[in-house]
Image (cartoon, rainbow, N blue to C red):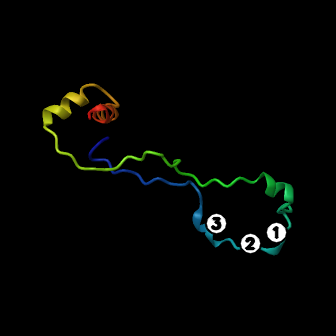
Amino acid sequence: MNANKLASRRSSKSDLARVDAHSVKAVEYKELPELTEEMLARAKINKGGRPYSPNPRKLISLRLPANVIERWKATGPGWQTRMAERLSKVR
């Protein structure tokens, strides 16, 4: 990225001021379909997010020598997972 160029703001490409200014009129309610029991039966609740892990990871702070970290990083992507697996085998 060019250091002299300012980052542009993301835009929803929508006229939000016009949308916010709109008030729903009684006539517009007639356009909506009737909500039926069958529609409600098909509805699904999506809570989103990740599923809970039975063995969640915990954040800690650990100081290691720079050469140890560099050797692990040199093994490529996933080095942190491989390090955690190796540490879990040590008893």
Q: Position of residue 51 (x, y in %)?
A: 53, 47
Contact check, label 1 and label 3, Cβ < 8 Å: no
Quarter containing the C terminus? top left
- Which residue has dot 1 on it? 29
Q: Position of residue 78 (x, y in %)?
A: 35, 31
Q: Is residue 36 above or below residue 89?
A: below
Q: Quick check: 18 left or right of 84?
A: right
Q: Secondary structure at mark 3?
A: helix
Task: Name the mark on residue 24.
Answer: 2
Distance CA(mark 1)–CA(mark 3)? 17 Å
Crowd rating for badge 1 (residues with CA inside 10 Å; few <14, some 14–19, many 20+): few
Q: Amino acid at mark 2?
A: Val
Quarter containing the N terminus? top left
Residue at 82 percent of width and 69 percent of height? 29
Q: Quick check: 76 left or right of 46?
A: left
* Viewer-proximal residue among 74 and 24: 74
Task: Name the mark on residue 19.
Answer: 3
Q: Amino acid at mark 3?
A: Val
Mark nearest the camera among 1 and 3 is 1
Residue at 43 percent of width and 54 percent of height? 9
Q: Is residue 3 above or below residue 83?
A: below
Distance CA(mark 2)–CA(mark 3)? 11 Å
Question: To which quarter of the image does residue 70 belong?
Answer: top left
Contact check, label 2 and label 1, Cβ < 8 Å: yes
